[in-house]
Amino acid sequence: MDDITTQFEEALRRHLRSASAINYDAELAQLGMDSMTAVAVLLEMEKTFGIRFPDEMLVEGTFRTARKLKEAVQHLRERKES
């Protein structure tokens, strides 16, 4: 599978206050993500990567950090490709 880092970071950066390097362990809420931003990020990730977040993944933990969100996106891409 190809590396999604560049596309992931570009999509995420468009919605966060910080335009600098993504700190994968920082709480996304501290970087400006609120519930409305989370919805916008979710829709952009779905469009960018051709995935759908199932209801059970629409929880705070999925959107807590960039690392958790990227892991979720990678998991959904792998599931789609298999």
Image (cartoon, rainbow, N blue to C red):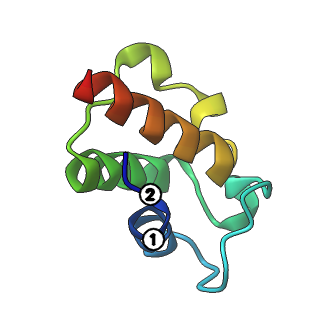
Q: Is residue 4 above or below residue 53?
A: below
Q: Which numbered dot is residue 3?
A: 2
**Residue, x 51% and y 73% (percent of image)?**
13
Q: Where 72 falls versus 56 (above or below)?
A: below
Q: As drawn, is 67 to the left or to the right of 81? A: right
Which of the two residues, 2 or 10, is positioned nearer the viewer here? 2
Are the residues at dot 2 and dot 1 in contact (C-beta closer than 8 Å)?
yes
The residue identified by callout 1 is 6
Element on which disc 2 rests:
loop
Q: Amino acid at mark 1?
A: Thr
The amino acid sitting under disc 2 is: Asp
List the single residue furthest toward the bottom. Answer: 20
Residue most toward the front?
Answer: 1
Corner quadrant of residue 81: top left
Horizontal side of 77 relative to 75 (left or right) equals left
Report the Cα–Cα distance between label 2 and label 1.
Answer: 8 Å
Q: Residue at x 48, y 22 (%)?
A: 57
Say which residue appears at 38% left-offset and 67% top-offset.
7
Residue 62 position, x and y percent, is 58, 33
Above/below status of 65 relative to 74: below
Checking the image for residue 78, the label placed there is none
Q: Residues within 10 Å of mark 1 (few under 14, many from 20)?
A: few
* SS at circle 1: helix
